[in-house]
């Protein structure tokens, strides 16, 4: 297990928390597309998210080595729309990579866009992402 | 013949179970009155147990309870992966593989938890595989239903943060501790398993929990923020086990508990199923079973977790007795 912290930047119309939630939901939909979800499903996200105690920015806490199952019914349209800063060439490559692995799995680390900040556990601690729980 | 006094010459009073169903829960046999089944009375139905703000358990706590928890099964991309279902209590008023499921995802035809998970044969019962799973599913809790009637359900919407109730090993029962199901950290997920709920805590908050410690750093309850907790456990730590709460008084197994440090909590609860009671003052507006704010703090395996926000000092002993009678802790 290799924990990675992915601080999410706000975009036009979405603050960090909203965008992180939307992205996390799209990661879950790689495995369980909307077409397979039921209204009564409780599970809607893949990874936990944490809020920086000082800045309020939200980070997705993932695992770069975790194999993410790619459902054959996956649809990346909404996920790509949430990544306006990612170059089109990289998006095209992601689509091809995911399409080629439908029904299989991809390590989460290979799904992280090059434009995303990635923090290790130690880096996240140094930047104050984890609470100081000493009273 | 409105009433049956004997079956095959055995007096009804001497029959404890019929096909594993407690006699007390059988009202009729082939339409004939077998006995007058006493109405179920759970902890929350008792005078001493009324008024809980939130109540979660692997057993039925109230006559009005219908569902104990909602679960998600994992089959690693196979048939039925990530389907969900509500799980009721069984004929013994507790969670088991015989528990009926309902409100399941589209395509699920299983009717019991054992079928839903395709567990194979457990304790002499073979569960069929109506959903044609190709593996035994592991099972995660995404919602622990509040039995208090206040709908303060404890939820976890992120799959990577959900605690586990079945390992996914064929021919294996639910995770258990001292013979009763237990909700614990998922072995294959990050250490941030937590079920979150919304409760307005008060200056007379009482938590009754059946739990233990199985990790070097683990939490029973986190309040609204990262610095809100009671009875935090950490191996070797001399730091206070409580934060964000005042006037904390702890009890363990029916007696006063002098734990003040995280190290105390760790050593006293390590692999030791315990009835932990905490009386504390707090103004938290939400909480978590476990700890949601840091990946380094694990969920303490838990079987029951009940919160009152009114004084329970006069009811403590009766509540403890009720809990201990069921879980046989001490």
Image (tube, coloured by chain):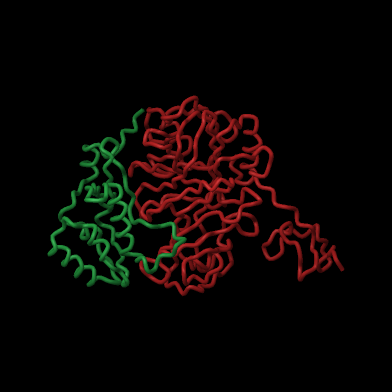
Chain colours: A green, B red
Quadrant containing the N terminus of chain B in the rendered view? bottom right
x, y percent for residue B35: 80, 60
The residue drawn where x is 39% and y is 68% is A36
Q: Is residue B40 left or right of residue B85?
A: right
Residue B63 vs A53, above or below: the answer is below
Q: Is residue A45 left or right of residue B153?
A: left
Residue B241 vs B188, above or below: the answer is above
Residue B214 vs A84, above or below: the answer is above
The residue drawn where x is 32% and y is 48% is A49
Quadrant containing the C terminus of chain B in the rendered view? top right
**Viewer-proximal residue among B62 and B317:** B62
x, y percent for residue B2: 85, 66
x, y percent for residue A7: 23, 47
Residue B167 vs A58, above or below: the answer is below
Location of residue A77 by image quarter: bottom left
The residue drawn where x is 79% and y is 57% is B36
Location of residue B290 by image quarter: top left
Furthest-top residue in this view: B247
**Viewer-proximal residue among B327 and B29:** B29
Q: Is residue B235 left or right of residue B117?
A: left
Location of residue B188 by image quarter: bottom left
Disc count in the image?
A: 0
Furthest-front residue in this view: A13
x, y percent for residue A121: 24, 44
């Amino acid at each position: 297990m290799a924990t990675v912290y992915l601080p999410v930047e706000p975009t036009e119309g979405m603050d960090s928390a909203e965008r992180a939630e939307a992205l996390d939901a799209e990661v879950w939909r790689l495995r369980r597309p909307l077409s397979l979800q039921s209204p009564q499903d409780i599970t809607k996200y893949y990874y936990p998210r944490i809020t920086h105690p000082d800045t309020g920015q939200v980070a997705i806490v993932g695992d770069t080595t975790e194999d993410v199952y790619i459902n054959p019914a996956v649809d990346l349209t909404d996920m790509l729309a949430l990544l306006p800063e990612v170059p089109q060439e990289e998006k095209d490559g992601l689509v091809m990579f995911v399409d080629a692995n439908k029904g299989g799995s991809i390590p989460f680390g290979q799904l992280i866009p090059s434009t995303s900040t990635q923090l290790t556990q130690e880096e996240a601690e140094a930047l104050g992402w984890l609470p100081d729980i000493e009273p | 013949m409105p009433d049956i006094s004997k079956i095959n010459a055995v007096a009804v009073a001497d029959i404890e179970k019929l096909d594993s169903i407690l006699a007390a829960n059988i009202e009729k046999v082939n339409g004939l009155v077998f006995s007058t089944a006493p109405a179920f009375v759970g902890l929350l139905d008792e005078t001493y147990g009324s008024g809980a703000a939130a109540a979660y358990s692997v057993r039925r706590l109230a006559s009005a309870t219908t569902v104990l928890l909602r679960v998600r099964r994992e089959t690693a991309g196979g048939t039925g992966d990530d389907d969900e279902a509500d799980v009721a209590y069984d004929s013994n008023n507790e969670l088991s593989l015989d528990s009926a499921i309902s409100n399941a995802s589209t395509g699920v035809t299983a009717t019991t938890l054992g079928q839903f998970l395709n567990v194979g044969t457990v304790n002499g019962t073979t569960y069929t595989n109506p959903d044609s799973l190709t593996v035994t599913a592991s099972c995660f809790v995404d919602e622990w239903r509040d039995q208090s009637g206040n709908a303060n359900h404890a939820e976890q919407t992120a799959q990577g943060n959900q605690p586990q109730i079945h390992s996914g090993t064929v021919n294996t029962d639910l995770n258990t501790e001292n013979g009763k199901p237990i909700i614990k950290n998922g072995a294959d997920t990050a250490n941030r398993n937590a079920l979150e709920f919304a409760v307005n805590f008060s200056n007379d908050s009482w938590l009754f929990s059946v739990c233990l410690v199985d990790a070097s750093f683990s939490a029973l309850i986190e309040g609204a923020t990262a610095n809100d907790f009671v009875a935090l456990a950490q191996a070797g730590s001399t730091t206070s086990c409580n934060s964000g709460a005042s006037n904390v008084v702890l009890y363990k197994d029916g007696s006063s508990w002098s734990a003040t440090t995280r190290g105390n909590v760790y050593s006293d609860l390590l692999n030791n199923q315990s009835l932990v009671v905490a009386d504390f003052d707090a103004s938290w507006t939400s909480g978590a079973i476990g700890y949601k704010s840091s990946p380094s703090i694990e969920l303490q395996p838990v079987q029951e977790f009940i919160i009152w926000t009114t004084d329970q000092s006069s009811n403590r002993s009766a509540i403890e007795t009720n809990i201990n009678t069921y879980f046989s802790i001490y």
